[in-house]
Amino acid sequence: MSVIYGLLAISIFVALVFLVVFILSVKKGQYDDSYTPSVRMLFDDELVKKDSKKSSTQKQKQD
């Protein structure tokens, strides 16, 4: 039974270490995405073009 208490204590300690490391990496900007914002407007243009083509063909069918 004492082994379970030891393993529980070790697992809680390891979880706390991972939590601290995660918080520190977030604060240092490890997960900041600097690539996607520069490319996002290129993808938005493609979506708008596809939507405008679909809407224009739908309007022609309705008329």
Image (cartoon, helix red, strand yellow):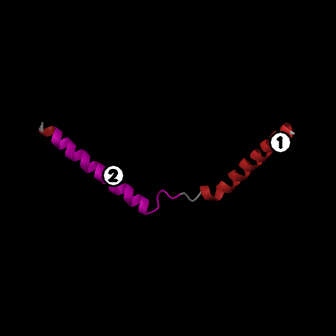
- Vertical placement of 12 versus 20: above or below? above
Q: Secondary structure at mark 1?
A: helix
In the displayed orientation, state which residue is furthest to the bottom.
Answer: 28
Check residue 18 for magenta coloring: yes
Give x and y (percent) for residue 26. Answer: 43, 59
* Viewer-nearest residue: 47 or 60: 60
- Vertical placement of 6 versus 36: above or below? above
Name the side, left or right, on which 8 lies relative to 60: left
- Vertical placement of 40 versus 61: above or below? below
Quickly name the residue at label 1: 59
- Identify the amino acid type marked 2: Phe
Residue 5, located in which quarter of the rendered image? top left
Q: Main secondary structure of the magenta part?
A: helix
Give x and y (percent) for residue 20. Answer: 33, 57
Q: Mark 2 or mark 1, which is nearer the start of the sequence?
A: 2
Give x and y (percent) for residue 56. Answer: 82, 44
